[in-house]
Amino acid sequence: MPISYAERVKIKEKLFRREVQMGRLQEREAARKEKNALEELCRVQRKFMPDLFDLFEKTADPRDPCYVTYPNRLMLGQMFFKGVAGIESMQGMTQAFNDEKISENLSGIMGCGKWKYLPHHVTENEYLERLDPRELEEVIWQTVYGLIRRRTFEDARYKKRWIVIFDATQTYSGERCINGKCLEQHFDRGTENERVIYHVDVLEAKIWLGDGMVCSLGSEFIENDEKYRQMRDEKVKQDCERKAFVRLAKKIKQRFPRLPILILADSLYASKPVMDTCREYKWEYLIRFKDGSIPYIADEWNAVPERESIGSAEYVNGIEYAGHSVNALHYREEKIKGGKPEVTEFQWITSMKVTKGNAEKMASTGRLRWKIENEGFNRQKNWDGDITHACSHNANALKNHYLMRQISDLARQLYEWFFLKRNGIKRAIKNISPVLLSCFGRRLTGGDISEKRLDEPAFN
């Protein structure tokens, strides 16, 4: 006997309710695996960043030893947990951590014993104003080196090269000049309506670890020095992203001389100096290209009547430009959006030879560049605190705040991927930090943060 339409609807609704109920039940079962979020974070940190607090302790202390109350390990450790908890302001940190149990827990995790009070935010800022940012850069490099040496992330490489994504972001923008190194943007220059916007920019190199994970490989601040202040108006040249790239690339090469790297970057980097740098350091590049970037390459591309193609990809190899043999790749993506077909086109220039066997894979790799915006800057600005909040007006302190945030963000990403997602625990990115913060004051035992559980299958 045929089933009526009304009966079919009832059966579908019943099955849907059953699936929803089972889904919620599974989520509850998964959530029970996390007895204490802070405990699980410590396990992940000790597994993937085992020397973190020791590296904090080894940084050169800029203070007079006669007036030191809190050791480096405690000063930087508190800033680490500030970032983990997604706390934006320094005053907010002092208020949130002004609890005896929280102070004892966090100081105990850092290996400092049990302190009843953690450093006040004024003390922290005075310390960060004097701390050399190169000390924190060394902490980041040591941590990343440890991750690279593990085999856990090797599948993220492309042709045995680590993907490093370069992009810049603003950490401050406003009409107030907070320090003498701010960049300037003038509107209606020379008129009575002239307006100046001051901003602090940083060029970031993020290494791709796969599964949506990116972590800082190096940072270079784009800032005006004293020479800029002394220039006449007609000769003013500010620091810029391309200049910062040369400086940052040099630092990375000095710190990781044998690391095979594939650079991903936007069309701003389609230039001879970037190509020269990559050739000198034996790096490969895959750079987003627009017709206005290098007109000569665009003309050569258009002059080729029959290009090699496979699927949605077209390519031309061997375009000579400024002493470089450049290869061009074009990819056409078609999808249905709102019931209508939508076409998006992408172009890259690369130092790697494009073939029918790798064209589409190379295009997919090139599109990873947006990950630094989404998994990198976007989560640090909108979902997990806000790196644009000026925790200090001092240029040196601003750098240290930013670098500490990169260290904290790496720990949170590792916790998210190697505990939450491995165990099927669904949690919005914006909710991870509040849950962690809520656990800071819970009672911890030695077993909660011991190393004896680090080699459990969840990390294999």
Image (cartoon, helix red, strand yellow):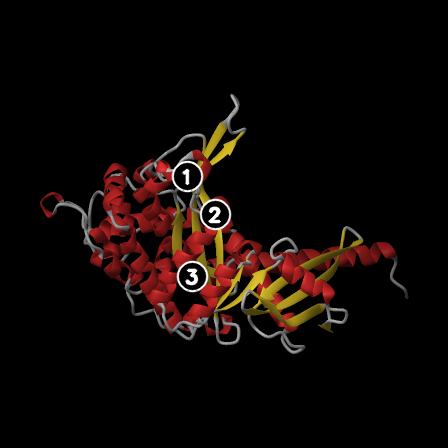
Point out residue 353 in the picture as x, y percentages from the top left corner. Answer: 59, 75
- Image quadrant assignment for residue 21: bottom right
Mark 1 / mark 2, whichever is N-terminal: 2
Q: Is residue 171 visible?
A: yes
Name the disc covering residue 414, or none.
3
Which residue is located at x 74 percent, y 55 percent?
13
Q: Secondary structure at mark 3?
A: helix
Q: Which residue is mark 2?
A: 169
Point out residue 295 in the picture as x, y percentages from the top left corner. Answer: 64, 57
Please tell me how crowded label 2 is: few (under 14), some (14-19), or many (20+) other residues with Cα within 10 Å. some
Q: Amino acid at mark 3?
A: Leu
Q: Which residue is mark 1?
A: 389
Q: Viewer-nearest of labels 3 and 2?
A: 2
Q: Secondary structure at mark 1?
A: loop
Q: Is residue 310 visible?
A: no
Up-down: is 301 above or below 431? below
Residue furthest to the bottom: 357
Which quadrant of the figure contains the C terminus?
Answer: bottom left
Q: Amino acid at mark 1?
A: His
Name the disc covering residue 46, or none.
none
Q: Amino acid at mark 2?
A: Thr
Q: Are marks 3 and 1 in contact (CB under 8 Å)?
A: no
Judge by depth and name the residue closer to the eye, 13 or 246: 246
